Amino acid sequence: MAIANRRLPARIVLASASPRREELLRQIGITPIVRPANIDESRIRHDDPTRLAVELAVAKARAIAPPRGEDLPILAADTVVAVGNEILEKPTDVDDARRMLRLLSGAQHTVITGVAVIPPHDQSEVHSKCAESRVVFGELSGDETEEYLASEEWRDVAGGYRIQGLAARYITELSGSYSNVVGLPLHLVYSILTG
């Protein structure tokens, strides 16, 4: 999808209910029309976290119809966290979140966000790519784990933590895009929308 003079569209349709993704788009000058994609994510399964993230993003983008009378790009994203070969999705409950924090403690993990864009004027075309970041947590004590769980920040987020919240104090290393770990790799979005 080429946009003349490498200019970002002023408006897009965001196929996500994530306030973090909406905020990130606004940060780079895009006003999103928020239309959450309600897909059954459990129907898309893969052992490969990269493939899973991209296929979920594509399914979300395809689930959204463009606004009537407007030709706007549709953007969707999905973030997956992987520790070794294990994919950490959104915790189902506090015990699942505790299990995830124990896996993350003192270890490196990968945050992968798949991004899919359906260009205006051609709903049959989908541009998709992914970004990867590597994150290292310090060793978490039992008290630190329980304090984080009590904060409720683990709810509704892949891997059970938010880098832009309390979990930032546990992160010792980050390689790659910070905005990717938040949930939307901004440079990748920019390159797809302007390339």
Image: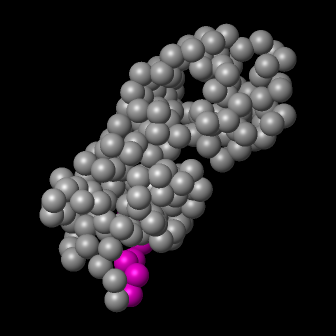
Quick check: 137 above or below 72? above
Q: Classify residue 147 as left or right of residue 42.
A: right
Q: Is residue 120 magenta?
A: no
Residue 173, image x, y percentages: 51, 16
The dominant secondary structure in magenta is: loop
Quick check: 168 above or below 27? above
Quick check: 140 above or below 110? above
Front position in the image: 8 or 139: 8
Front position in the image: 93 or 185: 185
Residue 67, image x, y percentages: 40, 81
- What residue span does the magenta drawing correspond to? 61-68
**Image-quadrant location for residue 107:** top right
Q: Classify residue 147 as left or right of residue 72.
A: right
> What scheme was used to colour the molecule?
one colour
Q: Classify residue 186 as left or right of residue 89.
A: left
Q: Is residue 64 magenta?
A: yes
Q: Residue at x 38, y 69 (%)?
A: 11
- Marks counted in the figure total 0
Quick check: 89 above or below 76? above
**Residue 66 visible in the displayed image:** yes
**Image-quadrant location for residue 90:** top right
Task: Say which quadrant the N terminus sits in.
Answer: bottom left
Q: Residue at x 67, y 10 (%)?
A: 139
Q: Residue at x 66, y 47 (%)?
A: 156
**Image-quadrant location for residue 49:** top left
Residue occupying the far bottom of the picture: 69
Residue 27, image x, y percentages: 47, 52
**Residue 127 visible in the displayed image:** no
Q: Residue at x 74, y 27 (%)?
A: 98
